[in-house]
Amino acid sequence: MEELLIGSHVSFKKDTQLLGSAQEAVLYGANTFMFYTGAPQNTARSKIDDHLTAEAYTFMNTHGINPQDVVVHAPYIINLANNANPSNRRFAIEFLGQEIDRCEQLGIPRLILHPGSAVKLTKEEGIQNIIDGLNTVISPEQAVIVCLETMAGKGTEIGNLDDLATILKAVKYPEHVMVCLDTCHLHDAGYDLTAFDDFLAEFDQKIGLDKIACVHINDSKNERGSHKDRHENFGLGYLGFDTLINIVTHPVLKGLPKILETPYVSKDEQSKERVYPPYRHEITMIKSKQFDPALLSHIRQDYK
Ligand code: FE
Ligand code: FE
Ligand code: ZN
């Protein structure tokens, strides 16, 4: 049986870059990982250091990680849907182009992107801006695939299956655009993931199963259709362990990187500050396919 490709979001620090990210992933027992090339919420980025990248490749090689399975997430303030402010628009397009270049330099083939929010525009205008933005930024010779993420539909967010289908049909270089499923976002958008085969059938009919490039594995703190986008630890939310395990191990998604973006755990039940990464325990639990209802206290014990 082919090994499950499972990992999590990890940090990317200025002085250790890809090497530090890979080391963090290995600490969690992961065989893939996802990172932002700087802080997720801003666009300050330092130059990629090729020596660190080379060291990272050696490290990954000896720890069973294929760089081709690693993914980058673009910062979520990039909004291709809105062109109300021309200088913001120019910046978003330019930054996305640089992000693609960074992925090329790092040898990472998948770049995850939130499609964007229409804000004061109509949804149709927002979608057209996303298509135009992608057409401006993607060049036919690039190796990087831009993966549009399925979104929860919070506010004016674009990113349900119909939106993504429209975008994928209209882009100039469709071979460079794919989809990243996010289980929390899909559930919050209203899709019933307990009937996952039905969901896949709908996805296939609207977009095509061969367009799935990556899967974000998160439980949800809210009921289906809430449009909230608040992630919960694996098995502890409204999706639950069985639904998520079925997705993680589903044969249709075999060979695709599964990335946890579940929240850090607080020191104790009272405190609000989230300090402990849950990923080592979650990955162990997923591999064993055995639900641990005391997951959070086991994580806390681990860091004491
Ligand atoms: Fe995302
Ligand atoms: Fe996600
Ligand atoms: Zn989210």
Image (spheres, grey):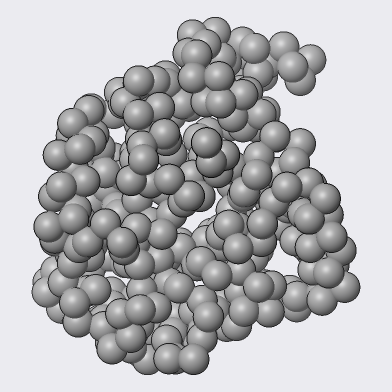
Q: Residue at x 26, y 83 (%)?
A: 171
Q: Is there any visible trace of residue 219 in the rendered image?
A: no
Q: Residue at x 39, y 20 (%)?
A: 241
Q: Is there any visible trace of residue 255 in the rendered image?
A: yes
Q: Position of residue 297 (x, y in %)?
A: 61, 10
Residue 238 lies, with reference to residue 262, above or below; the image says: above
Q: Position of residue 156 (x, y in %)?
A: 21, 59
Q: Residue at x 79, y 15 (%)?
A: 304
Left or right placement of residue 279 versus residue 198 in this view = right
Q: Position of residue 177 (x, y in %)?
A: 36, 74
Left or right placement of residue 163 versus residue 11 in this view = left
Q: Position of residue 27 (x, y in %)?
A: 76, 36
Give residue 176's quadrant in the image: bottom left
Give residue 296's quadrant in the image: top right
Left or right placement of residue 182 versus residue 11 in this view = left
Q: Quick one: 86 or 133, which is closer to the camera?
A: 133
Q: Quick one: 272 or 221, which is closer to the camera?
A: 221
Residue 299 lies, with reference to residue 210, above or below; the image says: above
Total numbered badges shown on the rendered structure = 0
Residue 14 lies, with reference to residue 139, above or below; the image says: above
Residue 200 lies, with reference to residue 303, above or below; the image says: below
Q: Residue at x 46, y 26 (%)?
A: 234
Left or right placement of residue 46 versus residue 229 in this view = right
